Amino acid sequence: MTSTLLTNIGELLTGRVGDEGPDLVADAALVVDGARVAWIGTAAEARERPDALAADQHVDAGGRAVLPGFVDSHSHLVFAGDRADEFAARMAGESYAAGGIRRTVGLTRAATDEALLANATRLVGEMLRQGTTTVEIKSGYGLTPYDEARSLAVAQQLTPETTFLGAHVVPAAADGGAGDAAAYVDLVTGPMLAACAPYARWIDVFCETGAFDADQARAVLAAGAAAGLRGRLHANQLGPGPGVRLAAELGLAAVDHCTYLDDADVDALVDSGTVATLLPGVEFSTRQPYPDARRLIDAGAHVAIASDCNPGSCFTSSLPFCVALAVREMGMTPTEAVHAATRGGARALDRDDVGVLRVGADADLVLLDAPSHTHLAYRPGVPLVAGVWQRGRPVLGRV
Ligand code: NIG
Ligand code: FE
């Protein structure tokens, strides 16, 4: 096992809270042992510590800011084709409609497993180059037992955080679907779940007008739980609805979108501890109003930021872009936004080993060509990620 002393870190953002240690350390140093963080302190302290100095290799971070690798807790990377024409139409005044999902379903079913894996692998690579070291990937563009299962088999080759989203939209009868929602829910909770459960950790439902209602979502989540899958929801994206309160009632790890919330929704999130995962790239790409992160944080809710990378509502793989949007449009401070994209995403996946730099956590590091994490929002669109370490290994950049 190799150990590394990383020193000359201009600013270290750890994501630690309370007695875990300080969140921000100036002129910091960090020891990585194998895949894990072994020690965190200042560079001056490291110079006095024989155990730190005894590390197998010493790496100079060049005064860069270092933060935990981003945890993208919501993406749909298993698909074929794109829907750039829909984006262009939206920018010309059309509104987003969930029915566009069916176009991607047709293209995905026609693609080979190899083509789906190649596309998803390319997107995970894009994410890595922008600092994402943990990603959740959903199915949801297959919508048959066979196509959902093979989508999840592809996802499982790229991440352990796989989510069965057979309940994405009801496929049209012409697409080989049951044509009506009740019959489709029976398919999702029966043969489709049986085919998919071996490949999935999570189960998700698009609980929204035009997709699935609260009773259908409850039925899908209950069947998933019986098959050993943990629940999460897409909810309150296109308008107010019951999904956020359902997620809170069921104690789900996360409910995602949360664009339209009333006071009862916010109270339910605070009381349950369910993470509100905000996806500002979606609002950017659909010209919807942004969710009010400030209201959620001030009320005491847990907040995550994720990309929702998908070919329809939001085709960005960039969490730095989402952080910048969250700061500019959702009332978050730069520090809150980075926490939401790191430790917040980890909480949304019920993980405490990633998204934070503390002793024993995975050594997933992002090195910025910038003196502080604030530059992620201050310099939007600029490729600041100079290096990425994943589980203790440099996977990108010179440092
Ligand atoms: O999270 N909201 C539902 N599903 C995706 C969009 C999928 C699509 O438009 O292809 C989302 O935004
Ligand atoms: Fe989504």
Image (cartoon, rainbow, N blue to C red):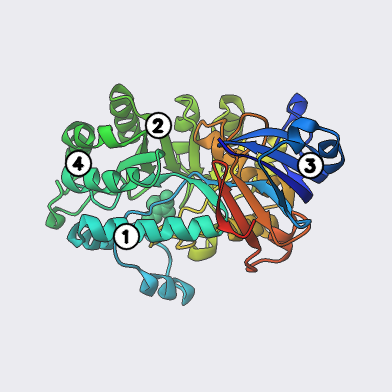
Say if 314 sits above or below 347 in the image.
below
Q: Earlier in the sequence, mark 4 or mark 3?
A: 3
Q: Of the residues tagged 4 and 3, which is closer to the observer?
A: 3
The one nearer the camera, 166 or 72, is: 72
The residue at 33%/42% (across/down) is: 156
Amino acid type, label 3: Leu
At label 2, which amino acid type do we have? Answer: Gly
Q: Quadrant of the N terminus?
A: top right
Say which label, 2 or 1, has the lower sequence index.
Answer: 1
Q: Distance between the residues labelled 4 and 2?
A: 19 Å
Q: Does the residue labelled 4 lie within 8 Å of ligand 1?
A: no
Label 2 sits on residue: 231
Q: Position of residue 52 (x, y in %)?
A: 75, 35
- The earlier-in-sequence mark between 4 and 1 is 1
Please name which of the two marks, 4 or 2, marks the residue nearer to the observer: 2
Q: How crowded is mark 3: few (under 14 residues within 10 Å), some or many (20 or more)?
A: some
In the displayed structure, does residue 3 sit left or right of residue 211? right
What is the CA distance from the residue labelled 3 to the residue labelled 2? 33 Å
Q: Which three-letter amino acid code belongs to the residue tagged 4?
A: Tyr
Q: Distance between the residues labelled 4 and 3?
A: 50 Å
Residue at image coords 87%, 41%: 44
Is 71 or 163 nearer to us in this picture?
Answer: 71
Asked whether the beta carbons under mark 2 and mark 1 sit within 8 Å of each other, the answer is no
Identify the disc placed on residue 118.
1
The disc label shown at residue 184, or none:
4
Frontmost residue, 61 versus 314? 61
Query: Which sits earlier in the primary sequence, circle 4 or circle 2?
Result: 4
Position of 328 with respect to 124 (left or right) is right
